[in-house]
Amino acid sequence: MRLVVAAMLHETNTFSPIPTDVARFGHRAMLKGKEARDYFKGTNTAIAAFIDQAEAMKAEMTIPITASAVPSGKVAAKAYKVITDAICEAIDKGCDAALLDLHGAMVTETEEDGEGALLARIRKLRPGLPIAVALDPHCNCTQAMVDNATALVGYSTYPHIDMYDTGKRAGRIVLDAMAGKTRPVMSWKQVPLLSQTLRQGTDDEPMKSLNALARAKEMQGLISASILFGFPLADIRDAGFSVVAIADGDKAKAEAAAEEIARAGWNAREDFVYKGRALAETVAEAKDLTDGPIVLLDHSDNAASGATQDVMTVIAEVMRQGLEDVAVAAVWDPQAVQEMTKAGVGATVTIGLGGKTDMPSINLRGKPLSVTGKVKTLTDGEFVIRGPMGTGTKAQLGPAAVLDTGKMQIVVISRHHEPFDVGIFTSLGIQPTEKRYLLLKSRIHYRAGFAKMAKHTFRLDGQGVTTSDNTLLDFKKIRRPIYPLDRINDWR
Ligand SMILES: [Zn+2]
């Protein structure tokens, strides 16, 4: 048995000004062969499950590439070609199946549907090849993806803490089918719903009940039910909510289950829309509290959804209102880190922090904030993630520093990284449990590392290209009508 195992992971925010070239993939991982196997083995990732499955059955395994980049703007055509050529060349050399760890929301300079185009190309090379695909539920699923894969299975958690299990399930479906034990048939239902990230957490409604419904369907004999709630910051035709159901030989059963879950998602549409609140008002409410840690979410500037992570609006307001004992993770500003490195630990510096990036899609100019503080810590920005999300993988912040203003300790980093693990603080000498406020540039994933310690949590409506204010975003390509851009009441 010969298996091709590969990963291609990028969530593309078409409103993001950050370019996604080959180098951006290089930051995280563009590994292959034994190097990729050794890096991912034992981690909580879908590809780790594929590796374990291939090794358990003593298959001949080829890993042509594992490419992953922090979310950002459209993927450069060259980067997409490098990744997809590697995968297709390995498959073309001959294999019995492909086990792929894909995100599902990749948009390139030339393709609205990076994953669908890849899967179609593979199937054209090897018609009928069994293909297992593990997906992120932020997948904006398409007909091309459904038509050109044997099994699509999405993570069922957000924060994503079941990546390994998802890979295991996707791989198992395809390997069982190859062994003649099952005959998977897939059904896909797309709903005209652009659900918002802040309302997609699986510890909250409506996802809690929708997940329970999907699990109930699996208990009733369905092979798999995946709720792909979609990534809303993508102006492409197929952005939004859909459901994939897989049944054993029974197409009608898959259709009925997908339909029922999709209908339930549609019925919950109002719950998938975030309702904002004035920034100053939220900060004032947080200021009145004394028992910490109190989590303050600068959700409009979330790097793991494509934001620049250098918008200073929320930090400026928290400073203006005089909150004390605040730790911030993190401001992306390689230039500021260099200035602090030059000044050295212990030096007092005044720097124009953040605000280095313009965001033409939302008409926002980058605006640095003048901050005076002491250089508290300098590190290489590397730490191993020990929390439940991406466990065992290595975070790479690039050169990192802490700027301490007295009231606020600000982690400044050189590579984009959403704070979802306590290591973002502890690796830089800050104990998050001892702080009154943790100001995090995050939306939902912070929960993996910080939800348990948080006494209160506030969503601070700042600025940035991960805004939840749809009136700021100019959608041109998405299919219409779609809720909530259009106030429709019928999904057909
Ligand atoms: Zn995701």
Image (tube, helix red, strand yellow):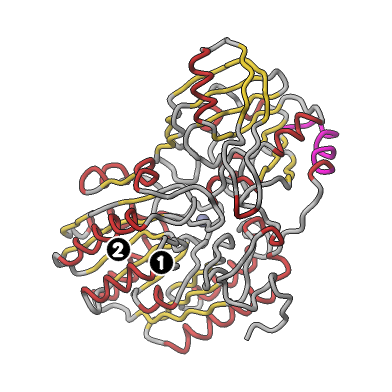
Where's residue 52, x and y in %?
A: 28, 54
| Rendering coords of residue 301 (x, y %) | 62, 45
Q: Residue at x 58, y 34 (%)?
A: 331
Of residues 287 and 19, which is closer to you in this image? 19
Q: Mark 1 Cα within 10 Å, few/some/many (few <14, many 20+)? A: some
Q: Can residue 353 be found in the magenta stretch? A: no
Q: Are marks 2 and 1 in contact (CB under 8 Å)?
A: no
Q: Check disc 2 and report its element: helix, strand or loop.
A: strand
Q: Is residue 490 left or right of residue 16?
A: right
Spatial CA distance of label 2 from label 1 is: 22 Å
- The amino acid on which the numbered mark 2 sits, given as a three-letter code, is Leu
Can residue 380 be seen by looking at this rendering? yes
Q: Dividing the picture into quarters, in which one does residue 370 lie?
A: top right
Q: Pick the quarter of the image with the C terminus.
A: bottom right
The residue identified by callout 2 is 99
For residue 111, which numbered disc appears in the image?
1
Q: Earlier in the sequence, mark 2 or mark 1?
A: 2
Locate residue 368, reporting x and y percent.
64, 32
The relative height of residue 122 versus residue 391 in the rendered view (above or below) is: below
On screen, residue 316 versus residue 202, left or right, reads: right
User: In the structure shown, which secondary structural element does the residue marked by tag 1 occupy?
Assistant: loop
Stretch in magenta: 281-292
Q: Is residue 99 left or right of residue 93?
A: right
Q: Amino acid at mark 1?
A: Glu
